[in-house]
Amino acid sequence: MNEARKNKYRPTVGLALSGSGNRSTFYIGFLEKLKELDVPIDYISACSGGSLIAAVYAGGKLEEFKALALTLNNESFRKLIGKRASKGGLYSLDAMEDELRKFTNGLNFEEVRPLMSFVTVDIESGEQVDLCMGDIARAARVSCTLPGIFEPVKWGSRTLVDGGLLSLVPISSLKKFPVDIVIGINMRGTKHIFTEGQITLRKFYNLFKKLFFIDEMGALFSGFWAKEDIDFENNPGLLSVLGKSMDLAIKADKQAVAQDLTCDLMITPNVPKTKKDIFSKFQPYYELGRQTAAEYAPKIKELIRQKAAGVPAEVPEISAAKTI
């Protein structure tokens, strides 16, 4: 029985963890410090690197994973990334998934608390898909599948990639749970998982195709242009997945005003930009996570106090996020 059910008048608390790339060690320090300060967490929705840390947190092995993450270097990192010929990406995350499963104890979403959902995107339909049932390690791997870099993953009838493609901070996914206090953490270094330069080049390419009727004259130009039709049943090409992903990112950017980012508290840490080796940044990001949690813990507790005074609510034992 979790803490929320021991005291049915305590409002539930949910965290929406943004994608974070090499900044993911921030979440190790953040979650670690919140636990030390007895700040309750009932629900977590996460995408990309946030899903990786959330999965380990669910497995109860954050301390062991921290030891691995803070000592990661080029050699150990390469062991987690398997080179592939071509299946829609340059590399596979199979080895990383196997390593991650050691820290999640092979648990499924249904077996862990806090209840969680990890955000992904169906590269074929362009739909956001929240995973909240089944193998939590595999779901975290899928949510970290950066299109074009890592091969897409089949999940049932879907072909899924990194949820950060469409979701800045997964507030809307978190709200599918019966959560009383919604807290967002924005660790995104850029507005997109792609750089602004890459997005600009894609827009120019799309405009060029439109102006010169490239799609309509595909047969004539087939020798000059990369095929962008994705064969999801067999072997989607890297350029096809990359192009489709960029188009989805461009569309999401145009519709950004419709993205639900309303919450009780949005935490956006002030992350200094440096040009050092990415592995040398892991310790500072971890320390920043602890500092940020210490700073915001009193504010979260005050939110709980205020909500408890006005809205008593019992926590239902359900998992409400969309699944497939």
Image: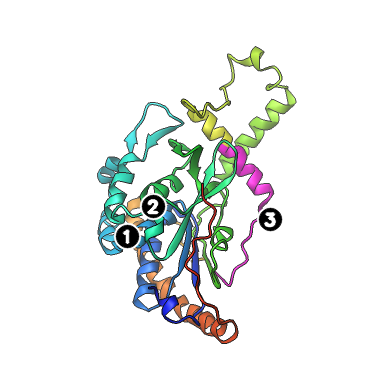
Q: Return the residue at label 2.
A: 136
In-image side of 318 versus 66 (left or right):
right
**Mark sitting earlier along the chain (1/3):** 1
Residue for point 47% across, 76% down: 296
Q: Tag 3's secondary structure?
A: helix
Q: Quadrant of residue 142?
A: top left
> Up-down: is 289 above or below 125?
below
Number of marks in the rendered image: 3
Tell me the kind of residue under disc 2. Ile
**Horizontal arrangement in the rendering, residue 256 relative to residue 108 (left or right):** right
Mark 1 lies on a secondary structure that is helix
Which is more toward the observer, 208 or 294? 294
Between the C-alphas of marks 2 and 3, the distance is: 29 Å
Closer to the camera in the image, 323 or 304: 323
Question: In the rendered image of this protein, does residue 176 appear above or below residue 228?
Answer: below
- The part of the chain drawn in magenta is 245-266
The three-letter amino acid code for the residue at tag 1 is: Gly
Residue carrying label 3: 258
Name the image quarter holding residue 7: bottom left
Category of crowding for the residue at label 1, using alpha-carbon neighbours closer than 10 angstroms: few (below 14), some (14–19), many (at least 20): many
**Image point (60%, 85%), residue name:** 310
Estimate the x, y position of residue 206 in percent, counting from the top left. 66, 31
How far is the residue under mark 1 from the one under mark 3?
Answer: 34 Å
Q: Do tag 2 and tag 1 residues touch (Cβ < 8 Å)?
A: yes
Query: Disc 1 marks which residue?
Result: 59
Earlier along the polypeptide chain: callout 2 or callout 1? 1
Kind of residue at disc 3:
Ala
